[in-house]
Image (cartoon, rainbow, N blue to C red):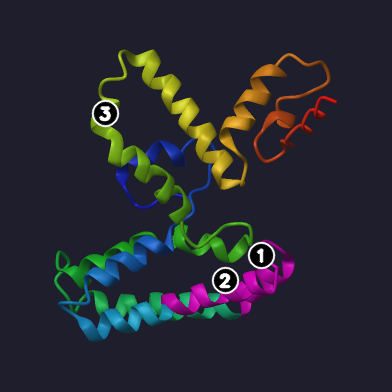
Amino acid sequence: MVNGYSGSKEARENGRVRVGCWGHVRRKFFEALSSSEEEATHALSYIRALYRVEQQAAEDDVLGTAAHLARRQARSRPRVDERLTWARKQQDLHPPKGPLGSALGYLLHQEQALRRFLDDPKGPLDNNVAEHALRIIALGRKNFLFAGHDEAAQNFAVVHSLVSTCQLHGVNPRAYIADVLVRAQTPGITPDDRMPWNWTAPAPAPAPT
């Protein structure tokens, strides 16, 4: 799941399917509020309805299930269809480089990718989780210029990815890395067993008597 940035083209190759991010669509219309309040508010209300479906699915504990898919088909799909029809009618009424014209163009250009969540309940509406994780990189980019050499920078990227994945799954990164390094060559343990989402913290050693 990526936005419409051209630099993400590589992520769309090698048989991968790109899923659009509704969070970026929302951001575009939010930025258009100051110049086209009525139209932008109208668009935001429809996007809010999509998130309401997801919130209710989470509250009912059906995320990623057939029941979740049925809700998206019955409630989210009509909203998406209506919004895209509205956007096509509005597009010629606003300058393409203006805030609202830019938001409309982004929505219509990403239509195919933005519709994909309707057919797969496992896909979220946005990639905000990844965006938040990458914020650490953005804030520290000046410090990371002095990693020493390319290999050191690559090693940092690997460690950062592991730590972020641990945090995402509620795993203590220090305990995870320490345990996995010790048991790296243990017979019978596969790489999948060592992934943060499959890892179980070892039982604490018994206290000395």
Cβ–Cβ under 8 Å for marks 2 and 3: no
Q: Please give left or right for residue 110 compared with residue 105 in the image.
A: right
165, 69: nearer the viewer: 165
**For the point 70% across and 25% down, which residue is it?**
191
Q: Earlier in the sequence, mark 3 or mark 1?
A: 1
Quarter of the figure with residue 72: bottom right
Q: Please give left or right for residue 98 compared with residue 115 in the image.
A: left
Q: Main secondary structure of the magenta part?
A: helix
Query: Residue beneath label 2, please?
Result: 54
Under circle 3, the secondary element is helix
Magenta stretch bounds: 47-74
Q: Please give left or right for residue 92 compared with residue 65 in the image.
A: left
Under circle 1, the secondary element is loop
Using the image, determine if residue 172 lies above or below residue 59. above
* Magenta stretch encompasses residue 68: yes
Q: Could you classify mark 1 by the number of other residues whose Cα lies within 10 Å: few (under 14), some (14-19), or many (20 or more)?
A: some
Quarter of the figure with residue 175: top right
Q: Amino acid at mark 3?
A: Asn
Residue at the outermost bottom position: 38
45, 186: nearer the viewer: 186
Question: Can I make out residue 104 in this image?
Answer: no
Q: Please provide percent x and percent y for residue 70.
A: 68, 73
Q: Amino acid at mark 1?
A: Leu
Under circle 2, the secondary element is helix
Q: Please give left or right for residue 161 compared with residue 86 in the image.
A: right
81, 43: nearer the viewer: 43
Q: Earlier in the sequence, mark 2 or mark 3?
A: 2
Query: Residue beneath label 1, please?
Result: 63
Cβ–Cβ under 8 Å for marks 1 and 2: yes
**For the point 58% across and 39% down, which residue is it?**
166
Query: Residue beneath label 3, please?
Result: 143
